[in-house]
């Protein structure tokens, strides 16, 4: 066990980190106080967060000790909000920061640059963000650090992730749900996570729940989750150093024992993984009293402990005494460099936590994707074959698992089979480290399919997984992807910033597959009907956002293949899991997806002529209704020239000035003409398409129908009727918006509203007309079956209403008779 005398150099290193942190918050000159502190040395505006920083630097220094001693591969994750100045200070001390940013050198000029850039316009933020070496976790939006840590160690057996969890962050729902990650951590093939719950008692302006909880209560909570707890508490630095060093050594010994038991002796199950609870004062080693108020150990230490420093000489002197209490003259040489005996305490090379390979993961091994031809759905003609589109993607992922046994995982909240992806279980099982029972379905501690009923964990695990260079897919129900909309936003912002950092390696894209869409939740009803996650992704910068709406299985295969090869994107794929009509063979699907949007000549009748109206669609259900509308118009209004355009890459609608996928104006005109009205049927909210088209010339000619928050437990066809996106609404739009009037324009709406009878089966000698009539037969039969079901519901409701009115009338008559009888008797 390390003694106080052995830990004195480490304490000095910690003092150096604390000194730099205070300098980042306050100073713009005189970085080592080589002259008396004056107002001109102070930044004009003081921004930053001191309260959590001493604890982060304390942990960082102790991790350096064990990394050097045991040659450990440690990934450090700073969870507490605004812990950036501490992490920046430590990466500067170890030399990483100056290697990545040579202008922030290891000298007095570099120190001045380090201080000036912090929380300054054009500088660096107060979080441990993408600009911070060694970081895969920002700590700005709280709650995700533990999930990121688990994701980072899956399939990385030599890695130790150390997430520091602030007691404010511990109050969040996502963090509370993340403790269960050890139930999915396989000690034989995965790395380890050592959570350090840092309790300093306060948030910005009030106490924290765990900060005020007893040790027994906290121990019961974490032991209930399966952890073996070590408590370290105090405010005397040297005593806490000794206690923490001993606790850290015991935790690492426990981790090694667990891994040896699993890797050499085949032990399975969920061992009691260690966790450390560290209680230290908020703003530790900072000012004790300011303006008669206690600072250290209270919420007042959270941000800038001493304000008004430029204006008040007494406070300026107080700041100078505080900074000199760290004895910078012992820590830095005449040139401003950390003295050699302290610099030697940091690890070297890639063992430095700021230079950790996983924190700048890049792509260690390119993904090995199978040829998608083997999964293609055979298409004899458009709109004849029915198939569950996502099922073929499940078959593809099964073989991706087989080809990438250490670098690909599916993350799904208990919906793999429901989403028709169950083919993955032909090769792999659900990961679960708790006991399994007879009757369990594909559940094993060896499994690598990640099912947990927490969208936050799925998202956090996958983010940690891809940011450290591996590949994955997050599949979930469309409506509930919104649970992680904020997490997706934070991930997008991370990627947006890294685009400007040449030293950041590209990482595999994060790919979403949304199924159980708003249009096909027949039994789940209104709560499961919501396409809003797409709006979250489309609002992000074009450098990172991609949205795909494949209309059928073969397009899904082509899109998925493309997405899994990409880097630094959020790829959103939306397609339903239910059996649906298939349109394109694989060759046509590849060509269509490569273009992103195409004219489907087989669905319309305009050929190369200028159409009278354009029917556009994006999404599988809108595609069905649009093609059906075109077939209906081809039958009842054959003189109307109709063009059908299908959009699979939604970002194609953007101007190329707004998104790199945006088509040129010439390409746009080629698809949608220059001035013909476009009836656009869309999977999501109509406003999203208008947003994408706002920069296009004559955008007002686009008339978009989409989801309108009309839903219930009902049939799929009733859903499109409720939201006014059915084939009949589209057809009437086309008639109303057409360039030239139709002779029977007034009669056609009556036919739509009185659609009880199927149309006569008129045949034509031309192959195209024959194909269109065949599709119309199919669509109408499908419509009749759905309408018949809906009609039964409607007839039942009507009968119930009649019974109610009859009962009411009888009651009124009875009351009248009673009143009359009473009056007569009087």
Image: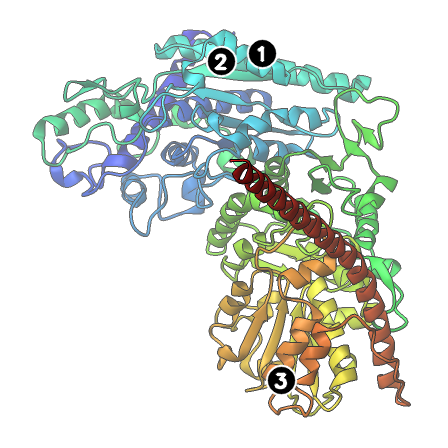
Q: In this view, does 305 lie above or below 687?
A: above
- Seen from the viewer's position, the closer of residues 245 and 595 is 595
Cβ atoms under marks 1 and 3 closer than 8 Å:
no
Disc sitting over residue 648 in the figure: none
Report the Cα–Cα distance between label 1 and label 2: 9 Å
Q: Disc 2 designates what residue?
A: 245
**Few, some or many residues within 10 Å of mark 3 (<14, 14–19, 20+):** few
Q: In this view, does 679 lie above or below 304?
A: below
Choose the circle earlier in sequence order: 2 or 3. Answer: 2
Report the Cα–Cα distance between label 2 and label 3: 69 Å
**Few, some or many residues within 10 Å of mark 2 (<14, 14–19, 20+):** many
Side (left or right) of 307 relative to 692:
left
Q: Disc 3 designates what residue?
A: 670
At a point 45% along the width and 21% down the height, the residue shown is 198
- Seen from the viewer's position, the closer of residues 143 and 815 is 815
**Residue 679: image x %, image y %?**
61, 76
Q: Disc 1 designates what residue?
A: 250
């Amino acid at each position: 066990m390390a003694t106080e005398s052995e830990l004195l150099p480490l304490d000095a290193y910690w003092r150096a980190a604390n000194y730099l942190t205070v300098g980042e918050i306050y100073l713009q000159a005189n970085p080592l106080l080589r002259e008396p502190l004056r107002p001109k040395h102070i930044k004009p505006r003081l921004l930053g967060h001191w309260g959590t920083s001493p604890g982060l630097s304390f942990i960082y220094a102790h991790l350096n000790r064990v990394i050097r001693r045991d040659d450990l591969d440690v990934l450090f994750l700073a969870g507490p909000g605004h812990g950036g100045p501490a992490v920046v200070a430590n990466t500067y001390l170890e030399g990483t920061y100056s290697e990545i940013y040579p202008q922030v050198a290891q000298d007095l000029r570099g120190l001045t640059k380090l201080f000036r850039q912090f929380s300054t316009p054009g500088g660096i933020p107060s979080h441990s963000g993408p600009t911070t070496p060694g970081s895969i976790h920002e700590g700005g939006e709280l709650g995700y650090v533990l999930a990121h840590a688990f994701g980072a160690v899956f399939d990385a057996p030599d890695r130790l992730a150390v997430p520091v969890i602030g007691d404010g962050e511990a109050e969040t729902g996502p963090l509370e749900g993340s403790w269960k990650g050890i139930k999915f951590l396989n000690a034989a093939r995965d790395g380890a996570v050592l959570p350090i719950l840092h309790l300093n008692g306060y948030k910005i302006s009030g106490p924290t729940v765990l900060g005020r909880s007893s040790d027994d209560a906290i121990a019961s909570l974490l032991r209930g989750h399966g952890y073996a707890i070590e408590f370290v508490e105090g405010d005397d630095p040297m005593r806490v150093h000794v206690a923490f060093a001993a606790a850290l050594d015991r935790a690492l010994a426990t981790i090694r024992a667990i891994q040896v038991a699993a890797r050499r002796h085949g032990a399975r199950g969920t061992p009691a993984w260690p966790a450390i609870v560290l209680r230290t004062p908020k703003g530790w080693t900072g000012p004790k009293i300011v303006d008669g108020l206690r600072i250290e150990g209270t919420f007042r230490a959270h941000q800038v402990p001493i304000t008004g420093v430029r204006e008040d000489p007494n406070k300026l002197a107080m700041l100078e005494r505080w900074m000199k209490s760290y004895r910078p003259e012992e820590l830095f040489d005449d040139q401003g460099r950390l003295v050699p005996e302290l610099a030697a305490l940091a690890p070297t090379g890639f063992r430095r936590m700021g230079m950790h390979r996983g924190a700048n993961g890049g792509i260690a091994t390119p993904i090995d994707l199978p040829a998608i031809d083997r999964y293609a759905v055979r298409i004899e003609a458009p709109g004849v074959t029915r198939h569950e589109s996502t099922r073929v993607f499940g078959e593809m992922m099964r073989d991706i698992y087989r080809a990438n046994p250490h670098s690909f995982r599916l993350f799904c909240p208990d919906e793999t089979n429901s989403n028709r992806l169950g083919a993955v279980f032909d090769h792999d099982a659900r990961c679960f480290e708790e006991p399994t029972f007879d009757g369990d379905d594909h559940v094993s501690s060896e499994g690598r399919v990640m099912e947990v009923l927490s969208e936050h964990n799925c998202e956090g695990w996958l983010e940690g997984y891809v940011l450290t260079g591996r590949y994955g897919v997050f599949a979930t129900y469309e409506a509930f992807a919104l649970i992680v909309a904020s997490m997706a936003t934070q991930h997008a912002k991370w990627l947006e910033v890294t685009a400007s950092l040449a030293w950041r390696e590209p990482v595999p894209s994060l790919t979403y597959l949304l199924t159980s869409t708003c249009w096909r939740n027949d039994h789940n009803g209104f709560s499961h009907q919501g396409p809003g996650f797409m709006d979250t992704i489309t609002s992000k910068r074009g450098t990172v956002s991609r949205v795909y709406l494949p209309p059928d299985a073969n397009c899904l295969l082509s899109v998925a293949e493309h997405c899994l090869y990409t880097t630094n994107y959020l790829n959103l794929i939306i397609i339903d899991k239910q059996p649906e009509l298939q349109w394109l063979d694989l060759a046509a699907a590849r060509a269509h997806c490569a273009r992103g949007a195409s004219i489907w000549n087989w669905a319309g009748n305009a050929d190369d002529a200028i159409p009278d109206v354009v029917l556009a669609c994006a999404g599988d259900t809108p595609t069905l209704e649009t093609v059906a509308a075109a077939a209906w118009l081809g039958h009842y209004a054959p003189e109307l020239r109709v063009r059908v355009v299908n959009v699979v890459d939604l970002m194609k609608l953007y101007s190329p000035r707004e998104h790199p996928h945006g088509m040129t104006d010439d390409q746009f005109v080629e698809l949608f003409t220059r001035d013909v009205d476009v009836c656009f049927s869309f999977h999501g909210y109509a406003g999203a398409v208008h947003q994408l088209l706002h920069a296009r010339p004559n955008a007002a000619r686009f008339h978009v129908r989409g989801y309108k928050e009309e839903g219930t437990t009902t049939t799929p066809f009733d859903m499109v009727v409720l939201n006014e996106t059915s084939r009949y609404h589209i057809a009437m739009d086309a008639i109303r918006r057409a360039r030239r009037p139709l002779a029977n324009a007034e009669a056609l709406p009556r036919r739509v509203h009185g659609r009880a009878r199927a149309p006569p089966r008129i045949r034509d000698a031309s192959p195209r007309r024959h194909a269109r009539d065949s599709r119309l037969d199919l669509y109408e039969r499908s419509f009749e079956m759905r309408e018949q079901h809906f009609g039964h519901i409607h007839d039942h409701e009507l009968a119930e209403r009649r019974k109610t009115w009859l009962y009411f009338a009888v009651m009124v008559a009875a009351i009248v008779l009673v009143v009359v009888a009473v009056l007569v008797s009087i």
